[in-house]
Image: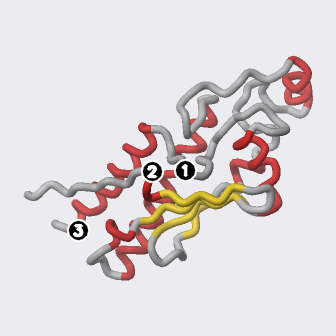
Amino acid sequence: MKRCLVAITKKNFQNSISTKKIDVKVNLSTELEGLTVAQKKDLKQIVGDTIVDEVRESSRKKTSSVTGRAFPKLSKEYRAIKRSAGGVGQPNLRLTGNMLDSLGSNTNRANGVSVTIPEHQAGKSFNHIKGDTLPKRQFLPDKGQAFKKEIMKAINQKVRDFKKTLKK
């Protein structure tokens, strides 16, 4: 059987990060070639779900889904605030859970998928991604970036696995 080569790389990403809009676009044009409409939808959903799951898992581990490095520790003051609000005193991006819970994927793009944060959570997300008014805890890639190697491998593996099921 011919090996299915998949190479989703940094070049496939077009990210828009602002206080009003968080949109990580993944161009899947090459991977979608030759697929039926239903298969395209399924593949885009798989890629979107993989990204969302991997970002949440990295956050749970208190590491950046972009750099792979540990998030900066919480200040003593903020750790106390977070604990008093019922959270854990860890830098896991979950005071209320609203920001990461709002992370979702949009499969309606013709040539790929977008991973988005709704506008009501965009400001908070922007500040974590950029590190301008908060310590930088980058959970989504900025312009010109992609996800860490392990997440890119997971995305590519999911695409390969999906394409293998089509050959049966």
Mark 3 Cα shell of 10 Å, populated few (<14), some (14-19), many (≥20): few
Three-letter amino acid code at disc 2? Lys
Residue 114: percent from left, percent from top: 56, 64
How many badges with numbers are in the image? Answer: 3
Q: Earlier in the sequence, mark 1 or mark 2?
A: 2
Residue 16: percent from left, percent from top: 65, 59
Q: Earlier in the sequence, mark 3 or mark 1?
A: 1
Q: Nearer the viewer, residue 111 or 86?
A: 111
* Quarter location, residue 132: top right
Dots 1, 2 in contact, CB < 8 A = yes
- Residue under label 3, please give it: 166
Report the mark closest to the observer, 3 or 1: 1
Say above or below: 129 vs 63: below
- Residue under label 1, please give it: 144
Secondary structure at badge 1 equals loop
* Quarter location, residue 97: top right
Say above or below: 124 vs 44: above
Residue shown at 56% from the left, 39% from the top: 65
Whole-Å distance between the Cαs marked 3 and 1? 32 Å
Residue shown at 57% from the left, 27% from the top: 69
The residue at the far bottom in this view is 37
Report the mark closest to the observer, 2 or 3: 2
* Quarter location, residue 166: bottom left
- Residue under label 2, please give it: 10
Residue 113 vs residue 78: left or right?
left
Three-letter amino acid code at disc 3? Leu
Q: Nearer the viewer, residue 37 or 110?
A: 110
Say above or below: 45 vs 17: below
